[in-house]
């Protein structure tokens, strides 16, 4: 066999949704794929907590989009058509939609979770996953999908068992989650309660306990076997997602919803685009397609985040009353997230640190995230 006939070999760092979506895409076009994961299994950062797979940034249903991209949807998922949203005064607003607002999925390595389902699909497709193998360097072409590199937002919460009925609740109040929101998700006897903070991170335990007490009083929270969890995320206007011949996907590229942190769809779709581009040798296609798919959405979300932080409790209460009551929830979210010229401009003017930062890399750098010493300063560059 001629060397040019040999299938491409693609290396991917990170076995999260972005990395495994990239692996499936590259494998589907004939590449040999190796995924390096520093932890002992997929989903090790998570504890069975519920997250939302959003359904409002495109008219196409997210599950249909994933199936079209070759990502199986055999993971446990529950459509959410109603959310009880509490404003800063504690007044409840029921927001509903005939179409699913989002799909509730579980994270972690247990059967039925999103992460485990992606792993099983990747292994069945012939992808090699090397666990406990932290890859610091990656020769191009390859995909870097190793998750967040700084904390622009943090979540602190509990997962638990309960006899409560299924339900989704959110609360918007700075006393519970500064510039963010708190949430309670219950499905099939399991639940997640958390506060999602965008500032004052050092007091997350105080905000979490206030959140728990709030939902006990206002939503009848009952639990047993509660276990704490926490996590972080990063976001920013993405300037370059291809650096030194490597494609960055998911949060490693800053592809995250800056407004409320619904980034799973961005991760899965950007991973798919990166995997195809690397396997076919068309990295320029990844940059252009990534910009077309997520560029305006991410920029708009950064602009939305800036506005949301400046509204304060009073402004958020008024916006909630005006936009939510008697309106279709999905339509409202589509309107809020829809890119517009002024949102894009605002998002690009807002001071955010882009990820990755190619200006910090040496010309001969092959780090997945630069740890070289720059010639000018002689100081090792940190990830954040």
Image (tube, rainbow, N blue to C red):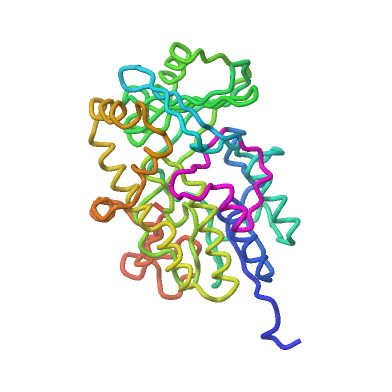
- When asked about the image quadrant of residue 198, the answer is top left
Quick one: 318 or 48, which is closer to the camera? 318
Q: Is residue 293 left or right of residue 111?
A: left
Quick one: 57 or 374, which is closer to the camera? 57
Q: Is residue 215 left or right of residue 315?
A: right
Q: Position of residue 19 (x, y in %)?
A: 58, 56
Q: Which residues are magenta?
A: 50-77
Quick one: 68 or 205, which is closer to the camera? 68
Residue lying at 26% horizontally and 55% vertically, measured from the top left:
341
Q: Position of residue 60 (x, y in %)?
A: 51, 50
Q: Quadrant of the N terminus?
A: bottom right
Residue lying at 31% horizontally and 28% vertically, measured from the top left:
320
Q: Is residue 41 above or below residue 52?
A: below
Quick one: 186 or 251, which is closer to the camera? 186
Q: Is residue 192 above or below residue 40?
A: above
Q: How many marks?
A: 0
- When asked about the image quadrant of residue 86, the answer is top left
């Amino acid at each position: 066999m001629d060397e040019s006939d040999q299938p491409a070999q693609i290396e991917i760092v990170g076995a999260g949704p972005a990395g495994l979506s990239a692996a499936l895409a590259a494998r589907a076009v004939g590449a040999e794929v190796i995924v390096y994961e520093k932890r002992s299994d997929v989903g090790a950062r998570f504890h069975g907590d519920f997250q939302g797979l959003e359904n409002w940034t495109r008219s196409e249903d997210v599950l249909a989009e994933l199936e079209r991209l070759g990502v199986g949807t055999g993971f446990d998922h529950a459509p959410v058509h109603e959310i009880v949203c509490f404003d800063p005064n504690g007044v409840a607003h029921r927001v509903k939609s005939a179409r699913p607002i989002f799909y509730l999925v579980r994270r972690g390595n247990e059967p039925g979770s999103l992460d485990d389902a992606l792993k099983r699909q990747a292994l069945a497709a012939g992808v090699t996953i090397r666990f406990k193998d932290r890859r610091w360097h990656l020769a191009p072409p390859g995909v870097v999908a190793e998750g967040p590199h700084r904390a622009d937002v943090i979540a602190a919460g509990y997962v638990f068992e309960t006899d409560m009925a299924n339900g989704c609740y959110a609360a918007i109040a700075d006393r519970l989650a500064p510039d963010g929101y708190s949430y309670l998700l219950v499905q099939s006897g399991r639940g997640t309660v958390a506060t999602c903070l965008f500032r004052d991170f050092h007091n997350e335990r105080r905000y979490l306990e206030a959140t728990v007490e709030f939902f006990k009083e206002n939503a009848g929270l009952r639990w047993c076997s509660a276990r704490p969890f926490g996590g972080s995320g990063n976001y920013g206007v993405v300037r370059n997602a291809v650096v030194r011949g490597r494609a960055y996907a998911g949060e490693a590229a800053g592809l995250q919803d800056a407004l409320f942190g619904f980034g799973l769809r961005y991760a899965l779709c950007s991973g798919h685009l990166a995997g195809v581009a690397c396997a076919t040798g068309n990295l320029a296609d990844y940059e252009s397609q990534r910009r077309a798919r997520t560029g305006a959405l991410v920029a708009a979300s950064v602009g939305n985040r800036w506005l949301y932080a400046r509204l304060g409790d009073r402004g958020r209460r008024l916006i909630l009353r005006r936009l939510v009551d008697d309106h279709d929830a999905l339509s409202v979210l589509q309107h809020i997230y829809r890119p517009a010229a002024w949102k894009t401009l605002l998002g690009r003017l807002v001071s955010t640190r882009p990820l990755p930062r190619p200006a910090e890399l040496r010309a001969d750098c092959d780090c997945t995230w630069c740890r070289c010493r720059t010639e000018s300063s002689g100081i090792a560059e940190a990830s954040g």
